[in-house]
Amino acid sequence: AQKVTQAQTEISVVEKEDVTLDCVYETRDTTYYLFWYKQPPSGELVFLIRRNSFDEQNEISGRYSWNFQKSTSSFNFTITASQVVDSAVYFCALSDMRYSTLTFGKGTMLLVSP
Amino acid sequence: DAGVIQSPRHEVTEMGQEVTLRCKPISGHNSLFWYRQTMMRGLELLIYFNNNVPIDDSGMPEDRFSAKMPNASFSTLKIQPSEPRDSAVYFCASSLGQGANVDTEAFFGQGTRLTVV
């Protein structure tokens, strides 16, 4: 069975601070995908990144960066110089490579204050 | 592309009534998913279709729930009879293909917020 744990329920930061959202996963599969989705207050789920288990290279996209460490089963997400618009619930998710069904973590609510 | 389109956006119904939620996936996507989001259980998969065929419906809570995909561009999730505990946000998502060599990120619709009173 697959499991995703986001231990941080809620994080509050002040604008321009860096913040890291933690994600730990469990799976018996040797190959799999990891994802991050953003859910802003308007409620939609916005895809941010997909990573496959073959590729442990860290990735940077603007102010966003992701650190994938297979040895610790973690896929952490860092926002640099946070902005108020980053306020949202962020979900980490896992899928196997046979099907696209997602197992989500419980989410981390990020509140960025001006 | 317009993205995944769900209707209605909001639905309020009385306990015991039938509710039908609708979804139009992204054109060309051959996988479709229904997820439910509640405070207690978070986001959970209800059912997954591939090429219009249900592949995994183990997440469907009980016989009151049913889902169909009569063609590649339309799916429904029906609850009959509805109960207050079915109140949740229901998301439809679609993705392109399945397997390791195909882009498989799922794109979500805006969700249907269902309230059963």
Image: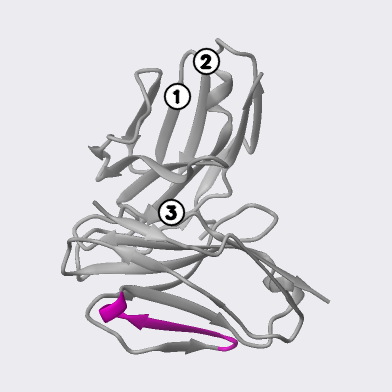
Q: Quadrant of the C terminus of chain B?
A: top right
> Foreground mark, 3 or 2?
2
Q: Chain of mark 1?
A: B
Left or right: residue A22 versus residue A50 is: right
Q: Which residue is disc 3 drawn over?
A: B26
**Amino acid, disc 2:** Glu
Assess disc 1: are there few (<14), some (14-19) or many (≥20) residues with their C-alpha within 10 Å of its C-alpha.
some
Is residue A63 shown above or below B102?
Answer: below
Residue B103 or residue A59, whichever sits in front: A59
Residue holding disc 1: B78
Q: Residue at x 33, y 89 (%)?
A: A57
Mark 1 and mark 2 lie on one chain; the one further toward the N terminus is 2
- Of the image marks 3 and 2, the number of the one nearer the N terminus: 2
- Quadrant of the rendered structure where residue A27 is? bottom left
**Element at label 2:** loop
How dense is the environment of label 3, judged by Cα within 10 Å: few (below 14), some, or many (20 and up)?
A: many
Q: Is residue B59 above or below residue B42?
A: above
Q: How is the image coloured?
A: one colour
Do the residues at discs 1 and 2 belong to one chain? yes
Badge 2 density bin: few <14, some 14–19, many ≥20, Cα 10 Å: some
Q: Is residue B8 magenta?
A: no
Residue at 37%, 45% in the rendered image = B33
Q: Position of residue A71 (x, y in %)?
A: 26, 80
- Label tally: 3
| Spot occupied by residue A13 in the image (x, y as percentages of width and height) | 72, 76
Q: Disc 1 residue type?
A: Lys
Marks 3 and 2 on same chain = yes
The answer to whether the residue labelled 1 contacts the one labelled 2, judged by CB atoms less than 8 Å apart, is yes
Amino acid type, residue under disc 3 in the picture: Ile
Q: Chain of mark 3?
A: B
**Front of the two marks 1 and 3:** 1
* Residues in magenta, as a range: A62-72
